[in-house]
Amino acid sequence: MGPRALLLAAVLFCSAESSVHVSPEKVNVSAGGVVILPCSFPPKDVFPTVEWSKTDLKKGLVFLFRDNREDLEMKSPLYVNRTNLFLEHLKSGNASLRISNVQPADAGTYRCMRMWNNGQQNITKVELFVEMY
Ligand SMILES: *[C@@H]1O[C@H](CO)[C@@H](O)[C@H](O)[C@H]1NC(C)=O
Ligand SMILES: *[C@@H]1O[C@H](CO)[C@@H](O)[C@H](O)[C@H]1NC(C)=O
Ligand SMILES: *[C@@H]1O[C@H](CO)[C@@H](O)[C@H](O)[C@H]1NC(C)=O
Ligand SMILES: *[C@@H]1O[C@H](CO)[C@@H](O)[C@H](O)[C@H]1NC(C)=O
């Protein structure tokens, strides 16, 4: 293993460790509605990169906040124009995700990853249930 492989192994090990967690928070919403998936971080002078993903989404992300703005490059078409963070609340460590016009297929487990430029990562999960009434 070269130094790069060792570094990768270290990164994988750290992220595996920080993803050991209590069971995900559960959130229910009616189809067609709006929902907020909670995520937060200790406020600092700089914002972390915030990556919202969904465990069964094979391609793309739900939301990526990087370099102080939304990065649309890797956004899944399924979530275009339906997701946002509360940018005015980022200062206070609020990285909660708002999803509008919730679809039945939105049900599942979401992952909020906060990545700091020192390499530290924090991951929490939220499970979304969509009710059809
Ligand atoms: C949320 O949805 C799940 C799955 O449909 C259901 O088991 C649970 O009772 C619901 N919780 C609330 C508070 O309605
Ligand atoms: C998203 O919103 C933009 C601006 O309103 C619009 O041009 C675009 O067609 C929308 N995309 C989708 C997939 O709805
Ligand atoms: C984040 O902000 C939204 C919008 O004001 C609010 O509904 C939500 O409860 C906040 N979440 C946290 C973790 O503070
Ligand atoms: C974030 O993860 C790091 C390890 O990467 C851990 O030391 C720290 O306590 C975590 N912080 C929070 C707020 O969970």
Image (cartoon, grey):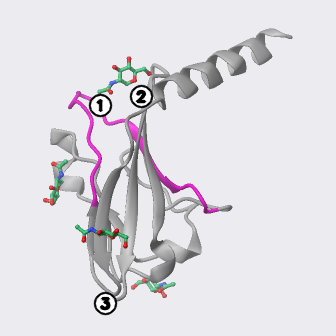
Where's residue 17, x and y in %? 52, 22
Say which element carries label 1: loop
Where's residue 19, x and y in %? 48, 32
Which numbered circle lies on residue 84? none
Residue with the mark numbered 2:
116
Which is closer to the viewer, label 2 or label 3?
A: 3
Three-letter amino acid code of the residue under disc 2: Trp
Proximity of marks 2 and 1: CB atoms separated by less than 8 Å: yes
* Horizontal side, residue 62 vs residue 96: left or right: right
Q: What type of secondary structure mainly makes up the magenta span?
A: loop
Spatial CA span between label 2 and label 3: 41 Å
Q: Which residue appears farthest toward the right when viewing the image?
A: 1
Range covered by the magenta-colored residues: 37-57
Say which element carries label 3: loop
Where's residue 89, x and y in %? 17, 50
Q: Earlier in the sequence, mark 3 or mark 1?
A: 1
Proximity of marks 2 and 3: CB atoms separated by less than 8 Å: no
Between 110 and 68, which is closer to the camera in this rendering? 110
* Quadrant showing the N terminus: top right
Which numbered circle lies on residue 46? 1
Residue with the mark numbered 3:
133
Three-letter amino acid code of the residue under disc 1: Val
Three-letter amino acid code of the residue under disc 3: Tyr
* Quarter location, residue 30: bottom left
Spatial CA span between label 3 and label 1: 42 Å
Where's residue 121, x and y in %? 45, 29
Quadrant assignment for ligand 4: top left
Taking the image as drawn, is residue 61 in sight? yes
Residue 45 in the magenta stretch? The answer is yes
Spatial CA span between label 2 and label 1: 9 Å
* Quadrant showing the C terminus: bottom left
Neighbor class of circle 1 (other Cα within 10 Å; few <14, some 14-19, many 20+) is: few
